Image (cartoon, rainbow, N blue to C red):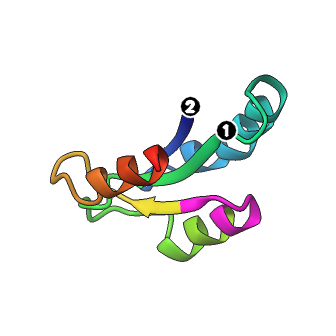
Amino acid sequence: MGIILVYDCTEETTFNNISNWLKQIETHASPGVAKVLVANKTDLPNRVISTERGQALAEEYNLKFFETSAKTGSNISEMFYEIAD
């Protein structure tokens, strides 16, 4: 079992929701479930969430962090391999 927490790096509100989602996971998911934090749409030029902010949030919650683009496929396989591992 694994949970992929994805935010849109061009949209601040999606990033701000991650903490709330993690609280819900803590309440409702099995203990020790694998989780990763994923910044998506990294191919777009109008990024508002930096790599550093994403990485800092991942470190705060002890999560692996990936930057991806569903459009280009960048880091998608790597992220799925990590969650499956």
For the point 33% across and 57% down, the residue is: 78
Q: Is residue 12 visible?
A: no
**Badge 1: residue crowd in 10 Å (few <14, some 14–19, many ≥20):** few
Task: Please identify the residue farthest to the bottom as the structure is shown.
Answer: 52
Decide: marks 2, 1 in contact (CB < 8 A)? yes
Q: Is residue 60 left or right of residue 35?
A: right
Callout 2: few (<14), some (14-19), or many (20+) C-alpha neighbours within 10 Å?
few
The spot of residue 61 in percent (x, y) is: 74, 58
Q: Which residue is mark 2?
A: 1
The residue lying at 78 percent from left, 23 percent from top is 28
* Residue type, label 1: Val
Q: CA distance from mark 2 to mark 1?
A: 6 Å
- Residue at the extreme left of the image, as rendered: 72
Q: Position of residue 19 (x, y in %)?
A: 73, 46
Task: Indicate the secondary structure of the residue bearing disc 1.
Answer: loop
On screen, residue 59 versus residue 26, left or right, reads left
* Residue 74 x/y as whole percent: 23, 59
Looking at the image, which residue is at 24% across and 61% down?
43
Please check the rendered image and state whether residue 82 is part of the magenta-colored stretch, yes or no: no
What mark, if any, has residue 33 been given in the picture?
Answer: 1
Residue type for callout 2:
Met
Looking at the picture, tell me which residue is in the foreground, 27 or 84: 84
Q: Quadrant of the N terminus?
A: top right
Point out which mark residue 71 bears: none
Q: Which residues are magenta?
A: 58-64
Magenta region includes residue 59: yes
Specify whether residue 32 is in view: yes
